[in-house]
Amino acid sequence: MRAPAATKDGIAERLGEARQRTLRLVEQLGEEQLNSVYSPILSPLAWDLGHIANFEELWLVQTAGGREPLDGNLGAFYDAIENPRPGRNELPILRGNELRAYMDKVRERALDVLAELELEDSEDPRLRDGFVYEMLIAHEHQHNETMLQLLQMIDGYDPPDLDPAPAGEPSSDGPEMVEVPSGRHRVGAADRGFAYDNERPRHEVELGPFLIDRAPVTNGAYSDFVAETGAEPPMYWERDGEGGWVSTTFGRRAEVDQALPVIHVDHGSAEAFASWAGKRLPTELEWEAAAAGADPARSNLDGRAFGCAPAGAYADGAADCGAVQMLGDVWEWTSSELEGYPGFRAFPYPEYSQVFFGTGLKVLRGGAWATRRNVIRPSFRNWDLPGRSQIFAGFRCAGDADR
Ligand code: AVJ
Ligand code: FE
């Protein structure tokens, strides 16, 4: 079945909505904050803003419209691969009014091009069914999450009131682990509709049976692990002076809530916890098989809550196997290294994911509270260096079931 092609009006509206959210996240900040380096592994916010617009110019103005860029030199500074994060603030990037004007001008030109194009039956697979437009909307959303990784380091940052906090979601009790029966599982994204190249081709794998934690590992369980083994606490935890922990994100000191999923742990710590618990991390394909049936609409995504819901919440969005919160709350580390699926073809550009295959990056699945809802789907693959913990990453454990 063919997905209904997005209308041009719909695309324009979603581009507008993405920009509104981007600007809302930074609206309370001054020039100095936009141009400060808070962490050597994160870009200044001004770089993200310019990069979002420059990427839009590349794809929606130059590629889609065959037009010349406003300033052909900018691409060199906003190329993420050519310019590693440390040092981005030393580049002659756009700042202040110049930056805002560039963002607006690019958007205006992108909408002009959109109005002229024939998308549905385009000969160009990059344009057909609006592929590059979906990609650019997703890209802006993805950079919102990168920006949140930095925004949480700013003292006194006031989370914008984007929406009322998610209504009281039914929490659930159940077994510690649920079983995914053995069988052939379809993984990856179908040929039609928007998905990144690394999710394709869809293929079948023989798995299981295996067990997977019903809910993400909690702060409570993780504190026990730290207390017993002397392991490092998660990033943004500090001692409260009475043997407990406080978290310090967004410049606020708050008692660590034992019931919430643990967040800001690196891959090695997740693995160490799993073996301490007599378990292991799931492979990414086990994770995807376990996530079948999970409902992205009933998940803590989209930055609405500015934090996690208690482990066991969103029971109405549970996957078919009974696992809850497979989508949303925290990205979940898997034991898998990022590689191309059998038959992988880079599209529309190898620098999105192909250049990272086989370089020791670990796959994360499921999206976090900070991930925009339409970025995520069960086949979506995220990745990072195993030592990174500024990302919104937690995990759940897996184990072998008796055959
Ligand atoms: C898929 C999150 C690892 O941020 O480096 C953004 C996404 N690619 N711009 C990243 C991405 C190009 C990417 N991750
Ligand atoms: Fe990018």
Image (spheres, helix red, strand yellow):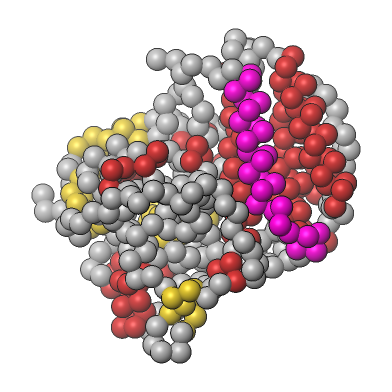
Q: Quadrant of the N terminus?
A: top left
* In the depicted structure, whether residue 38 falls above or below residue 212: below
Residue 146 in magenta stretch: no
Does any portion of residue 254 appear in the rendered image?
Answer: yes
Q: Residue at x 56, y 48 (%)?
A: 162
* In the depicted structure, whether residue 337 falls above or below residue 267: above
Residue 293 at what x, y percent from top left? 29, 37
**Which residues, given as a range, are shown in magenta?**
8-33
- Of all residues, the one furthest to the left in this rendering is 403
Task: Classify residue 252 as left or right of residue 100.
Answer: left
Task: Classify residue 337 as left or right of residue 5.
Answer: left
Q: Residue at x 47, y 22 (%)?
A: 192
Q: Residue at x 87, y 48 (%)?
A: 97
Q: Residue at x 63, y 38 (%)?
A: 18
Residue 25 in magenta stretch: yes
Total tally of numbered discs in the picture: 0
Closer to the camera in the image, 6 or 381? 6
Residue 39 at what x, y percent from top left? 67, 68
Residue 253 at what x, y percent from top left? 52, 75
Q: Main secondary structure of the magenta part?
A: helix
Residue 343 at what x, y percent from top left? 45, 31
What is the quadrant of residue 122 in the picture? top right
